[in-house]
Every structure is written in structure tokens, then in C-alpha cells.
Image: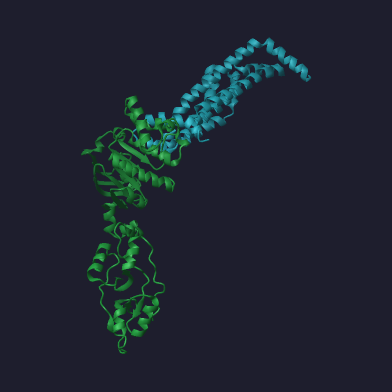
Chain colours: A green, B cyan
Amino acid sequence: MITFEHISKKFPDGTEALKDINLHIEKGELLTLIGPSGCGKTTTMKMINRLIEPSGGQIHIDGKPISEQNPVELRRNIGYVIQQIGLLPHMTIAENIALIPNLKKWDKNKTEKRIDELLNLVGLEPSTFRSRYPLELSGGQQQRVGVIRALAAEPPIILMDEPFSALDPISREQLQDELVKLQKEIQKTIVFVTHDMDEAMKIADRIAIMKDGEILQLDTPDRLLRHPKNEFVRNFIGDERMAKGQTPSAVDLMIRKVATVKESRGLAEAFRFMKSEQVDSLVVTGPDQEYKGVVTIEHVQNHYDDDNKRIHDLIEKVEPILPGVLYPEIAKRFAEKEPISIPVVEAGKLVGLVTRSSMMRGLAGLEQHSYREEGALNE
Amino acid sequence: MNEENFFVLFIDIVQSRWDDIFVALQEHLFLSFISIVIAILISVPLGIFISRRKKLAEPFIAVTAIFQTVPSLALFGFLIPFLGIGNTTAIIALTVYALLPILRNTYTGITSVDQSSIEAGRGMGMTDLQILMKIEVPLSLPVIMAGVRTATVLTIGVATLATFVGAGGLGDIIYRGLTSNKDELVLAGALPATILALGFDLILKLLENAATPKGVKAKK
């Protein structure tokens, strides 16, 4: 539908806003451009309706280069929604919605019918709202009108420049939900600029993460969560959100404060500790929390009478997992090898422990109980 | 001369000179009206032009401001060697005076139109002319009208000086009263000029209100 080929932009003051952007936007998809301010996301979007011209490269819409089209004609076939809403305050809601149909010289009756249809679409009662003025409406209502004004002349493409970011949080959520619902019905090609990752995750079919005039990664929300290409993308998406992604990983399922024991301890001490803490296993660690293995309460009981044995002699090598290991693999491990628990280890050091109950809590989205006092037996 | 005498004298003179006063009033109206219309025709397009080229705005406004600071009597006198005496000279001088308020308000009005409205208009595919006529002019009309109102009141006052370039007007009556030392005749010229100015001020105030778009009033 929309193709960017080697698009670059240098502003007269020498700043390089975009470097060699290549992008293909499919028909009917909602693509969000996201990135820190100054990354070029708005510049990229405004090139589609020629509000900004590229310094190099070519943009095609439906195979036709837009540089050869009349910008005014081009814009009348591309809906445009901006953050400041931009309703014309001296015109009624109906007149605002009718702007582009009138510019395109639509038949009066057709326009009037279209106004009612659109107002109904976003839940604004036509008989009440048609003759109101923009400033008599709340911010959320105004931006609903802003969105349907862009839809009025049935453009195949809609550009949205941070349309909801100036709204209060409740209106913002509502409008995002409505947009998702609306998009299911209208199936337009939408390019949506935002700086809000939650918003992008919620509404986008694909997300393009931009930085310093380049697209770092262009992927579906799910793939971005699972396979962030680099450190910047990972940070930009946010660790917390990574954990919130559809598939939980070991980090979400583990307890962080683990009952540990040092190798040199005697069995009687360890046994008493397990009893008092009501745990049936301890993780054995070295002086710097290096992971050594696990001892179970059965094992300790079995050798309890042997005075010469120390923890060191009873260690079982339970294979640890990395923090990023996803839930299905952890569940499989519990099913196949039936360990009491699985230690989570990063760079050789213990970071947590997944038990059956901590996994259930994690999957239910509950907070993990922290083990009440770490390492009473630690040296 | 006590109060009552002066009042009687004033009534007498208005009655006896009614024809003269009426002619002077017509001349005065004519001079002011033509000057204001010309000033609007120059200042409004110029104001729109300099709002597009902001680097030119300051010099243009400065020049009209300098015109305004020239003492009015001096300006009339200054024009005589070039243009002689008569209506033309008076109208040119009055027009020059009326330029600044209209130019400045047009410029301010157009440049203070909410940029988001303009960006939305451009993004929707309005041409520059459509943006001007459908967005910028309607939204800045109240400010432009306020400038016209200031200029009109100013011009009606300054037009009393047109008599010195032989263009007539109520200044004739005042001048005759001054030279013949008749205060009542001075008043017979000054009072209609004042009423004229106040009347126009009121009418234009109403026009200004009418020019404020309904939807913009709603927020107040």
C-alpha cells in the first residue's frame, strides 16, 4: 500500500532527521511509529501526505510515486488526525465533519447522511451534537470528532499523530479501545505515531521502533516482546512490560529470596533450618551466591545419622535455568523430571527459584511471596 | 458670559448656521469614510502579506508607526507642497493615519490564529486560499474589526484638521469659531464631531461582536 524507498531527510540547518528509511506498510494494517522525541517518527509520517518532503528517496502509494501527485489532491484522500485535535472553532461539529466531503464537492444529501452515520459510529448522538461547537465538547468528545472527520470522505489511508496523548487517561483508554473496535470494521491502512509503548502494544498490528532517524526494529508486538533486536529496543519496551508479555518467563514465576545453605554446613543444622522454615529443599551456594546444587529434606533425613557427612556430600545437580526461559519449557521440565524446584541462575549465580507453587502464583499474576528471611544459615 | 447665555448663544448659532453645519458634517463623513475604506483596502491585504513573511512584519509596522507619530497638523502641511490643497491631500493624510491600527491588528489577528487549526486544514487538503478564507480570516475577524474601530474613531478626530488643506469638514466650523472668537461656534463644530466619533465607535463595536464566530464566543 505505502512503500518508503531509501527515504532520507536533511533539514536546512544540517540535522539529519532520517537516514535511509525503507518501509512497506500493508493494506489494512495499523502500523505504529514509536521512539523517543527527535527520532524522526513524525517526520516519517508527515512525508506520506507531503507535509514534509524527503531530501532523497521515493514514496509510493499503490505503486504510484507521490512526488508526482498534487499535494492537495493527495491529502484529500488521506485522513489526518493530530494531537491538538485542530477542529475549527468557528464551525459546528457537522460543518467540521463535512469539511473534506465539501472540498471534494460531494452531494449535499450524501454528506448529511455521512455525518449522522459517523457521529453514531463513535456514540455521539447526531441530534445533540451536529449543531454544537467544538469548544462546547470535552477533550475526548472533540478527538472523537477529530477521528471521524478524518474518516469522512472514506480515505483508504489515515495518519494519526499522537492523537490521544493530550487526553486524560480515562478518555485515552476509551479512545484506544474504540479505535481497535473501529479498525475491525473499517480496515483502513493506519499509520499511528506515538511515544507511548502501552498504547502501541494495545492497538498496533506492527510496531516500528525508531531512533536517530532509523528504524531499529519493525515487528508485531508479540515478536518485539519475545525477540527484541538489541539493548535499546529491550529498554524501550521496558523490562516490566517484557514480563507482562503474553508468555511469562522464569523471572515472573520465581521467588527471589531463596532459602540457601553453604556446602560446609552439617546435616543436623540444615535439617533444623528446613523444619523451622517449612521448606523441603535448600539451594546450596558458594561464598558469592554461586550456584552449586540442591539438597532435599529426604536426602538429609536418610543420612542424618552419619556424623561425617556434610551438605557438600549430598548435593544433587539440578540443572538450573536462565531467567529468560519461557513458561512452556519450565512446565515441561517439571512434568518430565519432576524436580521439587528449579533454580534460576544467571552468570553462574543464583537469582531465584521456581517452585510449583511460585509458578502457579506467577501464572495467576499474583505477587510472589518472598522467602521471609534470606539465608539464616548463610555465613 | 454666564452659563445660560452661552447655552442660548449655542442654540442660536446652531439654528442660524444649521445649513453650514450640515454641509460640514457631510464633508467630514465623506473624508473619514473614504480614508477608512482606502486604509482597510491597503492594510488588510498588507497585514495578511506580512503575516506570511514575518521578517517583513517589523519594518512595515515600524514605518506605519512612524507615520502615526508625525504630528497631524505637520503631516497636512507637509503634503501641501506635493499635492496642493483639497480633498485628495486630506484623504491621503487621513489614510496614512488610519493604516497602523488596521495593519497591526490584521497582522496580530492572523498570526494568532491557532496553528493546530491551520495544520489540520493543510493536512486535510485545503489550498492556501481556502485556509485563508475559511480559517484565518473568520477567526481573526474580531481582531481586525477592533483595529478598524480604533482607526475610525481616530480618523474622525483628525479629520477636523482637513480644513487647513481646504477640504472642509467640521473643522471649518471650529476654525471659524476660533478666528471670530465665538466659543459657541467652536462647540457647534466640535460637538457633532464628538457625536460622530462616539456613534461610529458604538456601531463598530456591535459589528465587532457580530464578527466574533459563535463557536468562539461559546468558550467565554
Q: Is residue A148 above or below residue A272?
A: above
Q: Is residue B97 above or below residue A260?
A: above
Residue found at the very far bottom of the displayed protein? A308
Residue found at the very far left of the displayed protein? A63
How far across and down, in percent of the image, does residue B120 sit? 38, 37
State which quarter of the image contains the C terminus of chain A.
Answer: bottom left
| Image side of residue A64 versus residue A175, left or right | left
Res B167 → quadrant: top right
**What residue appears at the point 32 percent right and 47 percent down from the top-left corner?**
A203
- The one of A28 and A57 positioned closer to us in this rendering: A28
Residue A287, can we see it?
no
**What residue appears at the point 47 percent right and 32 percent down from the top-left corner?**
B215
Q: Is residue A256 above or below residue A135?
A: below
**What residue appears at the point 54 percent right and 18 percent down from the top-left corner?**
B84
| Image side of residue B37 versus residue A210, left or right | right
Residue B27, can we see it?
yes
